[in-house]
Image (tube, grey):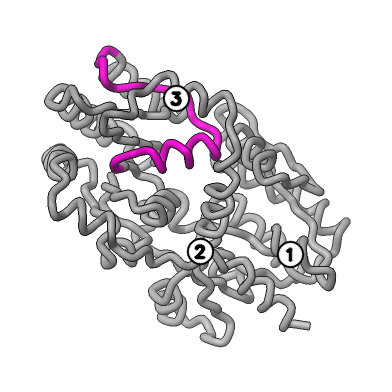
Amino acid sequence: IKALQDEPNIESKVCVTAQHREMLDQVLEFFDIQPDYDLNIMKPNQNLFELTSRILLSLQKVLEKFHPDLVLVHGDTTSTFVGALASFYHQIQVAHVEAGLRTYNKYAPFPEEINRQLTGKLADFHFAPTQSAFNNLVKEGIDPDKIIVTGNTVIDSLQMALEKLKSYTDKEIEFLQSKLDFSKKIILVTGHRRENFGDGFIEICESLAEIAMEHPEVEIVYPVHLNPNVRKPVYELLGEIENIHLIEPLNYPAFVWLMEKSFFILTDSGGIQEEAPGIGKPVLVMRETTERPEAVEAGTILLVGTDKEKIIGYSKELLKESELYRQMKKAHNPYGDGKASLRIKDFIQSLK
């Protein structure tokens, strides 16, 4: 968005679906982005059927009003897939940012794996973050000339955020400063994936409880997702443990600030697998598969699933500041140099 806004030869407009209203607004404010179209489709407890249909009908009106030559969709959300589908229905060209990520398991992650595969079928141009993502698309029959390896824009935004945080504070950062003892090792935890609901989250919580009780010198911080499928087991199993801090979800700047202060990270998130290695933080990924195999190959992340033995074992190993910790901390981040946005902008200009 910022790169396109800085280019006088491109007229760009920003449309947000607000699929995740609370998370969206603080990011827009932090990066000083004013949406031209805000569909505001978020409502409590809506399912994928409602979400998909509401985005599709809302986008119809936006596309009819603006008539763009090209629509950029980003990532693997329902908004991404439906944005591509709505553009296809209007016979507008589509470019997919963060294209080519795959697990080839349609239920892991759910629904993101199918969202991005379907988006790949609808897209005319594919901005792949890595060579591995490029290779996936070629195997699926995509014309290599339509695929551009750019790096991932998440690294661009991370670098912008870290620079801004040098002279930035807010209530959430001040809260973290007062709540946590940063002389101790901080383990940052995030978990929200649908495929981990139920037994998976119970295993994760039991692992965290054991780590906390065996390591009272460590502070575990868990910003708990608002989904009741996450909050119920987390608060039931971890709510009384003194050195586990269950807090509300953090805004983007506070989360980046905390990520930089952490010793290592336990997560089932996708983006963190790319962001954390950019600031030298080892990541244990609580998923059975990842669409980011480059990070596994580079040694910046380890897949531990929801296996208690693996979560606990690798956490203890990292806490010892072992050779494994040193190797993961120093490993090269395969997701780019922070110039993905400029490469995307240059390609769009070349289409004229």
Q: Amino acid at mark 1?
A: Leu
The answer for how far apart the CA atoms under marks 2 and 1 are is 16 Å
Left-right relation of 261 to 249: left
The answer for how far apart the CA atoms under marks 2 and 3 are is 30 Å
**SS type, badge 3:** helix
The magenta-colored residue range is: 240-264
Left-right relation of 49 to 189: right
- Residue at image point 68% right, 71% down: 345
Residue corresponding to mark 2? 152
Q: Can you say which quadrant of the picture contains the C terminus?
A: bottom right
- Picture coordinates of residue 169, whole percent (x, y): 58, 32
* Along the viewing direction, whichever of 298 and 106 lies nearer the viewer: 298
Give the image quarter of residue 1. bottom right
- Picture coordinates of residue 235, whole percent (x, y): 34, 18
- Residue at image point 34% right, 35% down: 189
Residue corresponding to mark 1? 4
- Picture coordinates of residue 8, whole percent (x, y): 84, 69
Q: Which numbered dot is residue 177?
A: 3
| Circle 2 crowding by C-alpha within 10 Å: few under 14, some 14–19, many from 20 | many
